[in-house]
Image (cartoon, rainbow, N blue to C red):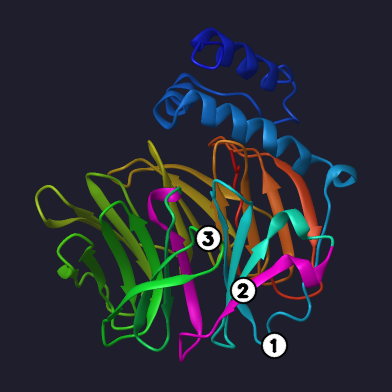
């Protein structure tokens, strides 16, 4: 009964915001951002805010490095919601996907659960259906999308899809997979019928990132374009040209977050009106961005990973320097 009480979660939220009067903390939230928490779900929002506290202080962050699992560059990582274990995935240019038990990160031998070699090309994207099911998808330069079930901890292949173009990004919704291709289009695959439902040809160069809501599909590409497609009317709603390529776009209702090679994060509303533009301090391209109600995290080509407050006026909380270029990043609260 306590966990179902809105008063209980409002009290925990108040605990997260006890420093909200400190401008350096970056935890001031507006009425619209409070509404965003209610849209996402107040319990999940509180969990994500509480979990992100450790990222603000280097003394409370543990770093684990896996040296021997891939021999090629790692292009994508994913932390999974799993009922039995805390699992993570990584996909690499060496054409393999590694599955890790995050509870065993202290030991590299025990940590690696499984290595999958189904693909014949660089692996560019990994995703989990609707953020919490046991279904996983991978996309590769070999033009194949593989569907897996991870219910037992390893990757059990369900099916595959050949789209005759390299797969660069995915967004795995319930019953629908969106994928961006080197051939300049965003595809939509209907899981129930097993057919490609549509191809959106709104770009003139490869598609690098895709995001979606029930009403819209957004995509960014090497043509510097940020595109909004209206799903209800099935038409191009808006197309804007950015100063530089956008490598990563994320949607968390009601905002669209866009990170680019110019070192900026831009926040848009759903019809792509610019609300905020924020200089992250990166002086090389941002390769990836992860965002939830707890924090915003960027991975930069200069090997720096920055952690910011999650609101639309971000404040730098922490910074981590890696030995090599950072190509992907994920922040995830596993309940």
Choose top left, top right, bottom left or bottom right for residue 313: top right
- 1 or 3: mark nearer the eye: 3
* Circles 1, 2 touching at the beta carbon (< 8 Å): no
Q: Earlier in the sequence, mark 3 or mark 2?
A: 2
Q: Residue at x 36, y 84 (%)?
A: 166
Q: Real-space Cα distance between discs 1 and 2?
A: 16 Å
**Residue 97, image x, y percentages:** 56, 76
Q: Real-space Cα distance between discs 3 and 2?
A: 11 Å
The disc at residue 71 is 1
Q: Is residue 17 magenta?
A: no
The residue to which callout 2 is attached is 114
* Circles 3, 2 touching at the beta carbon (< 8 Å): no
**Residue 270, image x, y percentages:** 31, 42
Q: Earlier in the sequence, mark 1 or mark 2?
A: 1
Q: Is residue 110 magenta?
A: yes
Q: Quick one: SS at disc 2?
A: strand
**Residue 276, image x, y percentages:** 48, 42
The disc at residue 152 is 3
**Residue 110, image x, y percentages:** 77, 67
Q: Residue at x 64, y 52 (%)?
A: 86
* Circles 1, 3 touching at the beta carbon (< 8 Å): no
The reply to whether residue 208 is in sight is no
Numbered label tally: 3
Span of residues in magenta: 107-131
Q: Categorize mark 3 by other alpha carbons within 10 Å: few (<14), some (14-19), many (20+).
A: few
Q: Residue at x 55, y 36 (%)?
A: 293
- 1 or 2: mark nearer the eye: 2
Q: Earlier in the sequence, mark 1 or mark 3?
A: 1
Q: Residue furthest front?
A: 152
Q: Real-space Cα distance between discs 1 and 3?
A: 26 Å
Choose top left, top right, bottom left or bottom right for residue 73: bottom right
Quadrant for the C terminus, please. top right
């Amino acid at each position: 009964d306590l966990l179902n009480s809105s008063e209980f979660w409002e009290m925990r939220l108040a605990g997260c915001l006890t420093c909200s009067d400190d401008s350096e903390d970056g935890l001031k939230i507006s009425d619209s951002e409070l509404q965003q928490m209610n849209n996402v779900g107040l319990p999940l929002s509180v969990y994500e805010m509480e979990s992100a506290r450790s990222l603000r202080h280097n003394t409370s962050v543990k770093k684990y490095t896996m040296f021997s699992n891939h021999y090629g560059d790692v292009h994508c990582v994913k932390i999974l919601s799993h009922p039995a274990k805390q699992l993570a995935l990584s996909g690499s240019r060496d054409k393999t996907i590694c599955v890790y038990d995050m509870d065993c990160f202290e030991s590299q031998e025990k940590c690696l659960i499984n290595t999958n070699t189904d693909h014949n090309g660089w692996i560019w994207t990994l995703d989990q259906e609707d953020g919490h099911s046991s279904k996983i998808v991978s996309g590769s330069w070999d033009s194949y999308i593989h569907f897996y079930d991870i219910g037992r901890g390893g990757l059990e292949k369900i099916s595959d899809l050949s789209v005759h173009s390299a797969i660069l990004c995915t967004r795995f919704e319930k019953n629908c997979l969106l994928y961006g291709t080197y051939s300049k289009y965003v595809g939509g695959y209907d899981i129930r019928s097993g057919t490609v439902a549509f191809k959106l040809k709104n770009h003139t160069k490869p598609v690098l990132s895709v995001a979606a809501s029930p009403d819209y599909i957004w995509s960014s590409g090497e043509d510097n374009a940020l595109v909004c497609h209206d799903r209800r009317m099935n038409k191009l709603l808006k197309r804007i040209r950015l100063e530089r390529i956008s490598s990563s776009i994320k949607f968390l209702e009601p905002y669209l977050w866009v990170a680019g090679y110019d070192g900026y994060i831009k926040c848009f509303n759903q019809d792509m009106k610019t609300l905020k533009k924020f200089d992250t301090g990166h002086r090389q391209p941002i390769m990836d961005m992860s965002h939830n109600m707890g924090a915003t995290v960027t991975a930069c080509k200069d090997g720096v990973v920055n952690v910011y407050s999650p609101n639309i006026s971000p404040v730098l909380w922490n910074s981590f320097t890696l030995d090599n270029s950072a190509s992907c990043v994920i922040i995830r609260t596993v309940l």
